Image: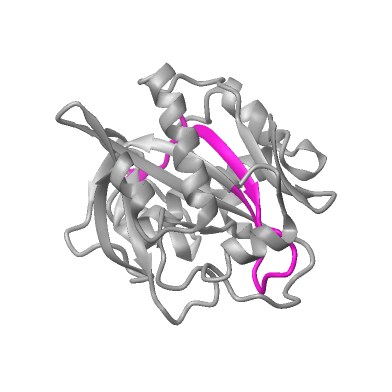
Amino acid sequence: MDGMTKSQVDRAEARDSALGPGPKRPRDAATLMLLDRQGGEVRVLMGRRHARHAFMPGKFVFPGGRTDPSDSRIPVIDGMHPADEAKLIATTARASIARARAIALSAIRETYEEAGLLIGRRQPFATPKHDWQGFVEHEVQPTLRPLRFIARAITPPGRVRRFDTRFLSAWKEDVAVELPDGGPTNELEELVWLPLSEAREADIPAITRTVLGELEKRLADDPDLNPGAPVPFYRMLHNRFVRAVL
């Protein structure tokens, strides 16, 4: 998608999301590429969005969604590695560490809500925040240490929904609890683990395919996804969708 004009991006994403005035400012969001090493290849967890959704209906996506205000007030065992956290902080208004941690936590929360997977450590955990009661019930305190910052992308103007999405990753072994019936929201159907090569060929949004390509390149150079690697950043600038590096 790098270098495409806005009209080219609009055509490429015509089936991904409804066009319209929508909010002018993109909303903070995060998505989690949960990875599993199996038989010498890496698989990624994806699920299909319901066809009734205005944003990316019927598409296979990673668990994720908008950052909520309450996400900034959730205690964690550990923060992200400083090298990745610094890059995430730099993407927030006024370089806010609290907002950066809220964004990272929203990826963990959404992975629980949509896929029934709780990332953290098994130990007693308490918070009054409604959206985090699953972690309280299953005694899992979240940790941000396993997360890696893989990519950032801002939805182009002219969509009914716009998000400033941070694509994060973690490994399946970082999951403390896996609920047998999936997450409580049922926002994602057909949760599947796909090899990266198959995931890129699935019915996925254009930006998701682009980010999967970035992930494959990074894994080829660094199979363990060590912290601190350059982070590609996609956005519309001067009528062209461009790639920068954070």
The total of numbered circles placed on residues is 0
Residue at 31% in and 58% down: 115
**Location of residue 162 in the rendering, given as x and y in whole percent from the top left corner:** 67, 63
Give the residue displayed 53% in from the left and 23% down from the top.
Answer: 81
The answer to which quarter of the image holds residue 110 is bottom left
Residue 246 vertical position relative to residue 49 in the rendered view, above or below: above
In the image, taking residue 117 as reference, residue 17 lies left or right, namely right
State which quarter of the image contains the C terminus: top right
Q: Residue at x 27, y 59 (%)?
A: 191
Residue 183 placement: quadrant: bottom left
Q: Nearer the viewer, residue 42 or 148?
A: 42
* Residue 15 place in picture, x, y as percent: 52, 71
Give the residue at the far right of this rendering: 238
The reply, left or right, for residue 7 in relation to residue 144 is right
How far from the left and from the top, in percent, is residue 160?
A: 66, 74
Near-viewer residue (55 or 182): 55
Q: Which residue corresponds to the image point at 47% horizontal and 65% vertical from the top-left?
A: 130
Magenta highlight on residue 231: no
Q: Position of residue 10 (x, y in %)?
A: 66, 65
Q: Which residues are magenta?
A: 140-165
